[in-house]
Image (cartoon, rainbow, N blue to C red):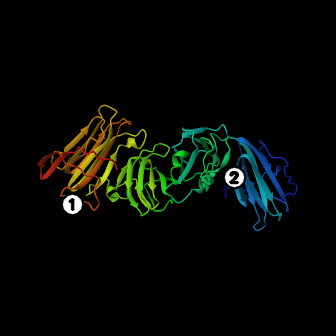
Amino acid sequence: MATRFFPLLLFSVNLATGTDFSCPTNPILRESGTFPSDEKTLVTFPNNYNCEIKFQIEDGFIYRLTIVANVTVGSGDSLTVTDALGKQTKYTDGVSLFVAAAKTASLKISTTSGNSQFWFRYTSEYVALNEQTKYPTGSRMDLRILPLNKIYTFISPYNDQVVLNTATIDNINLVDVSLRYIYVYDGPDVKSPFVGNLYDYVTSTKLSRSSGNATTLINFYGQHTFSYALANDYKSITPYDTYTFVVYTTYVTIPKNFMDGISNAYTFYCIRSDTSFLTDLNFGSNSFKADVRPMTPSDTNNVLLSYLSTDPVNLCMPQIIPGRVFTMVTLGPELSFSLSATADNWLTAYNGRLGYIFSASLWSPGALPAYNYTFQSTQLMTFTFNFPSVIIHQAGEVINVKVGAPGSQPASVTFTHTVTNPGARVANGTYLTASYVGNEPSSSSIISFQMKNADGTGPTNAPMTTTTHIETTTEICNSYSLIAVFILLVLNLL
């Protein structure tokens, strides 16, 4: 892989006839030098010259080749570097750097004109003892500014093969060509077999994966990229026809037929917010289901949100996802959806609305369970809510839901202990406030809710659930009726 530098580095041209153009007969091993060996600058090569210089590179070593070329246009003269995998790169002008990985490389100079100039320096470097950082699968890595020569290794804790995916920030249709500056080794360190640069690795028509349980990356060039990488266990993504890693700052839309598989998985990473919102979800005629899970496929297969094509999904938007990293699995290609780091209408109570409130601790390890949301309407609403899961691990933690109206005493439900589906509650008011007070990451809660106009006018789609009213308490305050109805019917998650 080569990178080119132009303007400020100037070379004089040596036209002397005493230059030693002798071609080395043996591979170069652990030596550093220049070619021609007696020159320190650009040299005019004679016509009809052919020389292939070979490098033998031991595991853990690299060769840095600083190449200067000035080829006469149309001459047919060339300088070509071939790497350990047989990939060739030609150089015609300017100053370039090529890093050759183990085990072999060659540089061939061919001329016919006698007018072209070449020169290069080769430096042997041992890199196996460089600083190394290891990550488990499920980890993501910022590739934008990788320190020069630092080693990064992804290891599967389950002794599975490792699959790397990359994502260009805010561009789902582009693979970052700068990934060519990052080299990939099939194993736990840079003594492992070199398998190419990261761009070629992730764009291969055949899925690239490690032969063992580790894959190693290193940036020998120090060049910046515009991407992130994500490592997964091979077995965690094999159930899907396609798998895509997406990184966005504030907003992203996945269009219909973006992936053509029946089962398509996407892992999303929002780099600017700990919270995202599903703002739009559209099923086509050939799409059936969408599930949303925390983190990556390597972390969990626990589904926290699920939508069917027969559901009134338009009444479920926007839906909060309190995590930076999450995975969506779609069944059928004709499905589009949008995600945003903000949603101005998240706290708007509208007729027919359905949804869930989650603790962030369910979506991100180490996150806190606390939240405080107030949904408001300008007209009287009927709020139905339940607690599919409340897990309290620390004394003093409290979950509370209040429904009320200005100037009235709100109806309130509070739990200080673990509960599961204790029964739906129904109350009328203009606002619903849901809060969790606590700071123990192992605690968590889920609240389901449904909102309808209190006058009985229904939404255009069927409601998410039906309830049976068996107990009612009514209080009249300031012309608003507050109704607390405790229902024994257990509400199930979507």
Which of disc 1 and disc 2 is earlier in sequence?
2
Q: CA distance from mark 2 to mark 1?
A: 71 Å
Q: Is residue 80 visible?
A: yes
Circle 2 residues within 10 Å: few <14, some 14–19, many ≥20: some
Amino acid carrying mark 1 in the image:
Thr
User: Compared to 494, does 189 lie above or below?
Assistant: above
Measured as percent of width and height from the top left, residue 305 is found at 38, 49
- Crowdedness of circle 1 by 10 Å Cα count: few (<14), some, many (20+)? few
Asked whether, in this view, residue 315 is left or right of residue 230, the answer is: left
Which residue is located at x 11 percent, y 49 percent?
A: 476
Three-letter code for the amino acid on which mark 2 is drawn: Leu
- Mark 2 lies on residue: 97
Furthest-top residue in view?
395
Q: Secondary structure at mark 1?
A: loop
442 relative to 170, above or below: above
Name the residue rendered at 72%, 56% in the picture. Answer: 88
From the viewer's perspective, is the residue at label 2 or at label 1 nearer? 1
**Helix, strand or loop at disc 2?**
strand
Looking at this view, is 258 or 194 the one in front? Answer: 258
Query: Residue 462 at what x, y percent from top left?
Result: 28, 58
Q: Is residue 336 left or right of residue 93?
A: left
Residue found farthest to the right: 18
Name the spot of residue 491 as percent of width and height, x first. 29, 47
Horizontal and vertical percent position of residue 367: 40, 40
- Between 331 and 56, the one lying in front of the other is 331
Q: Is residue 304 above or below residue 338?
A: above
Number of marks in the rendered image: 2
Please state if 209 lies on the left or on the right of 377 as rendered: right
Which of these two is toward me, 109 or 216?
A: 216
Q: Which mark is residue 468?
A: none
Using the rendered image of the protein, determine whether residue 144 is visible from the camera's viewpoint.
Answer: no
Q: Which residue is mark 1?
A: 457
